[in-house]
Amino acid sequence: MAKPSASSDRLDILNALTRKVLWLSSWTIHHANHIRPNIDGLKVGGHQASSASLATIMSALYFSVLRPEDRVAVKPHASPVFHAIQYLFGRQSREKLENFRGFKGAQSYPSRTKDVDDVDFSTGSVGLGVAQTLFSSLVQDYVQAHGWMKDRREGRMIALVGDAEMDEGNIFEALAEGWKHGLRNTWWIVDYNRQSLDAVVREGLWEKFETMFRNFGWDVVIVKYGRLMREAFAEPGGEALRRWIDNCPNALYAALCFQGGAAFRKHIQDDIGDQGDVTRLLDRRSDDELLALMSNLGGHDMASMLEAFESIDHDRPVCFIAYTIKGVGLPFQGHKDNHAGLMTVAQMERWRAQQNIRPGHEWDKFEGLKQDTAMLESFLASVPFNRDGRRLSDAVLDVPGRLTFTAAAQMSTQQGFGLILNDLARSDSAMASRIVTSSPDVTVSTNLGAWVNRRGLFARAEKADLFRSEKIPSTFNWAASPKGQHIELGIAEMNLFIMASALGLSHAINGARLLPIVTLYDPFIERGLDALNYACYQDARFMVVATPSGVTLAPEGGAHQSIATPLIGMAQDGLSSFEPAFVDELAAIMKWGFAHMQAAPGEGGSVYLRLSTRTIDQPQRIMSPELEADIAAGAYWLRKPGPNAEVIVAYTGAVAPEAIEATGLIGESRRDVGLLAITSADRLHAGWTAARSLRRHRRGVQHLSHVEQLLAPLPRDCGIVTVIDGHPATLGWLGSVRGHRVEALGVEKFGQTGTIDDLYRHNGMDANAIIDAAESLTGAPVRHRKMAV
C-alpha cells in the first residue's frame, strides 16, 4: 500500500511547531533550574534529554494525527513537551510553566487531577500508564457493546513508551490480557532512544519487541530512517552506509552522536575502508551536515512519522518502534549520562541565538519562527485534537435507599456480599445495569458466582457455556455476550487494579459512568499495590472487595493470611477502607460506597471492603438512619459504656465474637464496660485528623470528629483494649484521641495453618487475651474467663 505524503506547506508548519515545542519544553526546564529563585532539590535534567527525543513524535500526534476521541498516556519524562503543546493550544498558562515542578505549577509528570491542561491519563510510575491505555480500550469496547457511546466515535488509546520502560513486568501481563479479550484501537509508540537512566539498552532489543508484539496479535511498524537518511541511501554508496548504520552497536552510535560529525566520518571510513562511493557520499557533507544526516532517525523526521501514523487504516493494535536519539539537538545528545544532563546558562544562550529567540521573549508563542503568526494561529485552531468536547462526564446514578439481602442467623460478610449483589442482579435499576465486576480468576471463591449467573460474562461476541450446552450439571452459567457485566481476568492483581482504574474513569473517558466492583484475596492486594495506588492517584472510582481478612482462612496457612492490609487501607489516599463484622453493616457501607464513588472530585473516591469467610452470629436489629450514619462514619457503640467505665473493648471485623464474649466476661467484674464496633478505622482516623486541622487553622471552631464524640463520655483513666485480625497499629492510635491508655491486640507475624481458634489464641487476640489486656490496664483481676475446649 502506498503511503500518503504530507504537503510541503503542512510539513513546514509542523516542523516549525516542533522546533517551538522543543524550545518551550527546554526553556521550561532551564527556567526551573537556573532562573526561578529558591529552588531546592533534584535538578530536572532528565526531562530535558527525554523531552527532546519525543518532540517530533508528539508534535506529529497532537498537531496532525489525533482526533478529539483519542486518549493519550504521555511518557513521564516528556511532560515538558506535553505542557508546551498545550501552551500553544491555549490550554496551559505561562504562569504554570514558569512554575514547573513548583507548588501549584505544571506537574513534573502529567497528572489528570493536578494539571490544568488536557491530561487523559496520569503517568509517573513507569509502565502503568502504558497498560492503562490497553485496559481503557477494553473498557471502551464494553461501553460500546452496551450501547452507551451515544454518538461518539471510538477513540484510539495511545501510549508513548520509553524503550527502557518495557522492562516493567506489568506491561507484559497486560499484553497477555489484551490478547485474550481481542484488543482493538490501541497504539503504543516506543521511543527507541536505546538509553535508560543508567545505561545503554542491549543490542537487538527491538527484534525481541517486534517478535513479542506480533505473537500477541499486534501489527508492528518500525520507523528507523528519516528523509535525509533515505535520500542518502539512494546515492552511490548509500547501501553500504545503511549496512553500517544497521550494524553499529547502540553504545557506539550514541557516543558518536555526542562526539559529532567528525567522529562519525572517522568511524565510518575506518570500518568500511576506502570505497570511492562511500567516501564521496561523506565528502559531499560537512561535519555538521553529516551529524544532521546521522541524527535523522525516523523518530525525529516529521514526514516519516506522519507516513507511519497515517498508514494505519484498521483497528488492530499497533506498536510503533520509532528510532530516536536521547537529547537530540542538545549539547549532550547521546551521552550515556544525559539523563542527569542539563544545559548550562552559556549553552542555553547559544541555543537561544540559534533559535532567533530575543531575550525577554522566551515565552512568546511564535517567537523565532518565520511563518506568519495569523497562519500559525489558524492552523492550531483547526487541529482536530484542539477542539472542544474532550472533557466528558455522566449523570450520577440513583442509589437505593437500602440494599437488601436474604438474612440468616449465621453468615459471613463474604457470603453477605454475594447475597447483596444477587439481589441487585435481580433488579432492573439503572444503577444495577452500570455495575461491572471483575476478578483475577477468583470469581467463584469471592462470592461473585450468583451475580455472574444472572448478569453474565462480557465478551464482544456471543460465547456459549459448553458445559451447559452439553447438559453437564454445573452450579454456574458461564455464557458470555456483549451484554454481560463481568469481565474475567487471569491471575494478575496488577491487571485487576489497572482494569479497575480504566473502568473507574469511564465517565470521564467514555462519557458513560460505570460502578466497578473488583474482588480478590485480601493478602494479594500487596501484589498489585503499585497499580492500586496509581488508580487512586488518577481519582478513578471503584469498589475493592478483598477477602478473607487476616488469619480467618486459617487452614490455608500464611500465604493466604494478611497482616498489613488494614494499614494500607488507612494510608492510601483516595480509598475509604471498611471492615464490617456483620452483613447489615456491609449493606449500609455498600450503599454509602456507591454514592461515594460518584461524588464530585475532591469529595468522593474509591472504597475498600475487607471481608471474611468466617461465619458468625448476626444481630437481630432494625437498621435505623442514625445507626447507618454511624456505620458509614466508622464506628458505633454495640454496648454503650456507663459513666464509671474502667475499660472498653474496641474491635474491628471478624474478631467480633471474641470481643463480644470478652466484654461479657469482663462486665461481670467491671462496671459500665463498653463495646465499640469499629467499621472503618480509616474513616475514624481521617475524620479525627480533619477536625484537628480545622481547629488549628480556624481558631475558636469547636468541631469534634465522630471518634471524639464517641470517646467523650469515657473517664480520663478508662483503658481501651483494641483488637483486629490485622496489624494492631490499625487501632492503636485510639488512645491519642483523648489520652486514654491502650492495649492493642492483633497479628504481627506471618501465619501458619490451624483453626481460627488456634491462630487467635496463638496471636493473642482471643477472648482470654482481651481479658488479659483489660487486667493489665485496670490493675485488677477479672474473675471469669473462657473455658478451654
Image (cartoon, helix red, strand yellow):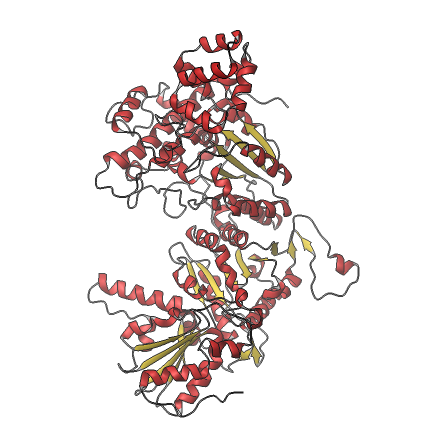
Quarter of the image with the C terminus in it = bottom right
Closer to us: 600 or 751: 751
Camera-side residue: 635 or 570? 570
- Whether residue 194 sits left or right of residue 355 in the image: it is right
| Residue at the image point whose x is 64% and y is 60% from the top | 455
Instruction: Please provide percent x and percent y for residue 554.
Output: 55, 72
Q: Tell me residue 757's x, y (percent).
A: 52, 79
The single residue placed furthest to the right in the displayed view is: 470
Q: Is residue 611 above or below residue 196?
A: below
The residue that appears at 55% across and 61% down in the rendered structure is 519
Q: Is residue 427 visible?
A: no
Percent position (x, y) of residue 326? Answer: 42, 30
Whether residue 305 is situated above or below residue 735 in the rendered picture: above
| Picture coordinates of residue 686, whole percent (x, y) | 35, 64
In the shown orientation, is residue 524 left or right of residue 42?
right
Position of residue 630 in the picture relative to residue 412 (left or right): left
Q: Quadrant of residue 724?
A: bottom left
